[in-house]
Image: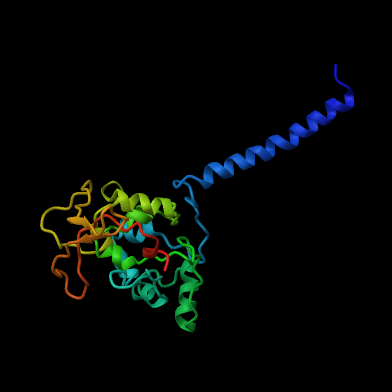
Amino acid sequence: MFTKEFDTRVKTTVKIILPVAGVVAVLLILGFRNTVTDVGYRPQQPVPFSHKIHAGQLGVKCVYCHTSVETSAHSPVPSTSTCMNCHTLVKSDSPKLKLVRESYETGKPIEWQRIHKLPDYAHFNHSRHIRAQIDCSSCHGKVEEMGVVAQNKPLSMGWCIDCHRNPTEFIIPARPISGIFTGVKAGKYDPNAKATLAQVKALTEPQFGQWETEIPKNEVPGIPVPKHPGYGPENCSSCHH
């Protein structure tokens, strides 16, 4: 019915179109889903540091290494001197710590590979979220169970907005291992507890994503106003400024 030349053209066209269509479909599916963006990204680090050993087995709290998260917009990477607080005595001759020792002696920082990164046009303030007693695992996952840290959440705009609109569904309240506001509330720690929201009211009618929240007294010396999490803002200028 068809000529050999026509049949060859059809087969060639199909061989080209199907793979291209498949790639486009995958990109569209992944690009429009908030649950997959960069999740699983796990670069190789210059030093084989295990959070599973340090935080999981030894119980070193997050804030011991990642200091000032309660007061700073950024969560700093620990300096080599922080590592050497322990490793001047603990496994001081381990070949795995050779780069750490060299960094400590020369003053040259270790070039850690960044895992969690937002676009330059998006601003995220760690202290604002930590002061609301939002646990680190809400965004980073249970790092204390990771031998090698990988990105656990997509950190996309849609994912952030979902949390701002439904905080009790996404927020994990502060846990003892994080070291943030441990002991602020009396009672036994409940790993299955849901976040307790503050009383909030909209600033406008109808509301456009800005809320007024009751701010309790400062219960932790040196930490600006610990408070309950509320509904997050949805106006553009909160994150893009």
Residue at the far left in the pictured view? 186
User: Residue 223: image x %, image y %?
Assistant: 22, 72
Q: Is residue 109 shown left or right of residue 190?
A: right
Q: Is residue 229 shown left or right of residue 86?
A: left
Quadrant holding the N terminus: top right
> For this rendering, which residue is in front, 186 or 7?
7
Q: Residue at x 22, y 61 (%)?
A: 212
**Is residue 35 in view?**
yes
179 is higher (above) or lower (below) than 101: above
Q: Residue at x 38, y 56 (%)?
A: 140
> For this rendering, which residue is in front, 152 or 72?
72
User: Residue 116: image x %, image y %?
Assistant: 45, 60
Q: Is residue 50 shown left or right of residue 230?
A: right
User: Residue 57: image x %, image y %?
Assistant: 31, 56
Residue at the far front in the pictured view? 205
Quadrant holding the C terminus: bottom left
Residue at the far top in the pictured view? 1
198 is higher (above) or lower (below) than 29: below
Q: Residue at x 74, y 37 (%)?
A: 16
The chosen color scheme is: rainbow
Q: Quadrant of residue 7?
A: top right
202 is higher (above) or lower (below) than 47: above
Q: Residue at x 41, y 59 (%)?
A: 50
> For this rendering, which residue is in front, 128 or 86?
128
**Is residue 133 in view?**
no
Q: Is residue 126 shown left or right of residue 201?
A: right
